[in-house]
Image: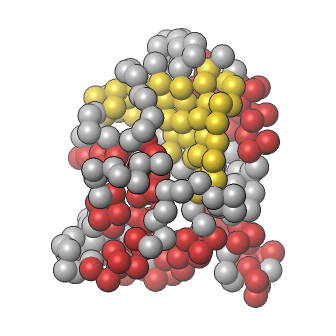
Amino acid sequence: MSENSPKDFVFLQVSSIPYFRALLRAVESSYYQDLPLPAPVYDVGCGDGHFASLTFDQKLDVGLDPWRFSMKEAKQYDAYKLLVEADGAQTPFPSNYFASGLSNSVLEHIPHIDAVLKETARVLQPNAPFYFCVPNDTHFKQLSLRKIFGKPYEIWFQKIQRVRHADSPAVWEERLERAGFRLERHWNYFSPAALRVLEWGHYFGVPSVLAKALTGKWILSPTKWNLYFTERFIRKYASTEALENGTYTFYIARKK
């Protein structure tokens, strides 16, 4: 899974976003290096464009997101040829237009997920690949503080992460089939130990939130020396290996 990628995604991510997000995104960035993305490419839920700007060497054709604030930030990263502010269930694109699509750590947040998947299938060409990754049904059960506070903590953390769908591959396969996709392959990644690093990062990452609010930057000094210990710490958890007990799942689907 791209262990020999020429880009050091761990440092690229940790030098620009909070370490707990950087850990997860570094793993996900690596996966795309081995995946074909024929143009035009459609990114469903592109957010602020940061992920695409670090992951891909070329601009993606279209990034779509419903949030105006995210669109403003995405313009600064210049990772897309075109940015479109719209709901993923109601897009302005013609049918069978895009040759490939992706949605990185987005679909789990969308309440009307079936409508978005159906619309995504509509705008993709027949046989076009669609890549996405989401937390799976083991995700919240592996949180460290759940062992102490039980189900209420799981529910509370789910709200923090704004996750609507932490489901098994079987559930996602059913959704994909209804929408007009077939599931070709999937694998679990991100160990329970890595998840707990991410979990505690939500608490220890408060200084980064303050830095972002005051300066517009998550990391004030994105240098090797400043990030030396943080980088060394998260790197040991940034495995791209497929894991049976992984808490996230990466999917490769294809439009029928």
Q: How is the image coloured?
A: secondary structure
Residue 115: horizontal and vertical position, in percent?
Answer: 68, 30
Q: Quadrant of the C terminus?
A: top right
Determine if residue 191 is in view. Answer: yes
With respect to residue 138, does 19 lie above or below? below
Direction from residue 127 to residue 208 in the image, left or right = left
Residue 195: horizontal and vertical position, in percent?
Answer: 58, 70
Q: Nearer the viewer, residue 40 or 254?
A: 254
With respect to residue 255, does 143 lie above or below? below
Residue in the image at 81% along x and 75% along y: 151
Residue in the image at 30% along x and 75% along y: 211
Direction from residue 17 to residue 125 in the image, left or right = right
With respect to residue 10, does 83 lie above or below? above
Residue 48: horizontal and vertical position, in percent?
Answer: 37, 49
Determine if residue 89 is in view. Answer: no
Q: Nearer the viewer, residue 28 or 176?
A: 28
Residue in the image at 20% along x and 74% along y: 224
Q: Nearer the viewer, residue 157 or 35?
A: 35
Residue in the image at 54% along x and 56% along y: 241
Direction from residue 203 to residue 52 in the image, left or right = left
Residue 42: horizontal and vertical position, in percent?
Answer: 44, 28
Which of the 4 quarters of the picture holds residue 222? Answer: bottom left
Which of the 4 quarters of the picture holds residue 210? Answer: bottom left
State the count of labels. 0
